[in-house]
Image (spheres, rainbow, N blue to C red):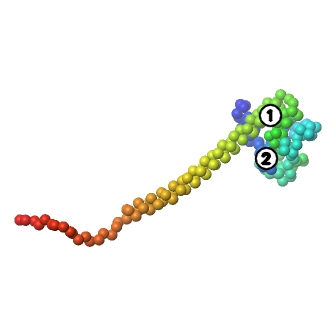
Amino acid sequence: MSKEIAVEVIATRIMEVRNKKVMLDRDLAKLYGVKPKALNQAVKRNIKRFPDDFMFQLSWEEAECSRSQFVTLKQGANIKYLPYAFTEQGVAMLSSVLNSERAIQVNILIMRAFTRLKEILFTHKELAAKIESLEKKYAEHDQTIREIFSIIKQLLEPQPQEERKITGFSALKRT
């Protein structure tokens, strides 16, 4: 799989929880090639490296929402433990906890995915600002154009003509 495709695939696993972009432990474990239980045990052994802004545990409601977004369990299966969500900094810290060659390579791809999402978000905000600016600009033009059309319509309407008196000399026909 090429790096670009891998980054795009990873980016689909990044979700927003509590207004933070995060990846869930089960998705990270799959990428790192370990079981979620092993990943969480490694994190718990190094819990000082993971403050609340690096990692947090989902509530049952959040877990259900994440489950409906990404169907990962078999039909009828229930989650036994609440998943952990890792922010970008938490994912970066995982590379020091899971010190394997695969972990390093996967971590690089994940960091690129987070960066790619930031670029897209920035571009989206820029584009939204430009569209808003154009809407304001053309809203003023719309009113001016309506006024111009109104005047043109008035000019095109037939005007009642008064009978005119002929003034001046008329040439008489001579025979």
Quadrant that contains the C terminus? bottom left
Amino acid type at mark 2: Lys
Residue drawn 69% across the image and 44% down it = 121
Percent x, y of residue 7: 73, 36
The quarter of the displayed image where residue 164 is located = bottom left
Q: Residues within 10 Å of mark 2 (few under 14, many from 20)?
A: some
Residue placed furthest toward the front: 168
Which label sits in the foreground, 2 or 1?
2
Residue drawn 13% across the image and 65% down it = 171
Residue placed furthest toward the left: 175
Secondary structure of the residue carrying tag 2 is strand
Residue 107 marker: 1
| Closer to the camera in the image, 50 or 141 | 141
Quadrant that contains the N terminus? top right
The quarter of the displayed image where residue 26 is located = top right
Percent x, y of residue 109: 76, 34
Secondary structure of the residue carrying tag 1 is helix
Residue placed furthest toward the top: 101
Compared across the picture, whether 73 is left or right of 126 comes to right
Picture mark count:
2
Percent x, y of residue 2: 71, 31
Q: Estimate the spatial distance between the alpha carbons at disc 2 and disc 1, rounded to whole Å.
A: 18 Å
| Closer to the camera in the image, 119 or 23 | 119
Q: Residues within 10 Å of mark 1 (few under 14, many from 20)?
A: many
Residue 20 marker: 2
| Closer to the camera in the image, 36 or 73 | 36
Evaluate if marks 2 and 1 touch, with contact meaning CB atoms under 8 Å apart.
Answer: no
Residue 6 marker: none
The quarter of the displayed image where residue 124 is located = top right
> In this picture, is 91 found above or below 157?
above
Amino acid type at mark 1: Asn
First in sequence, mark 2 or 1: give its number: 2
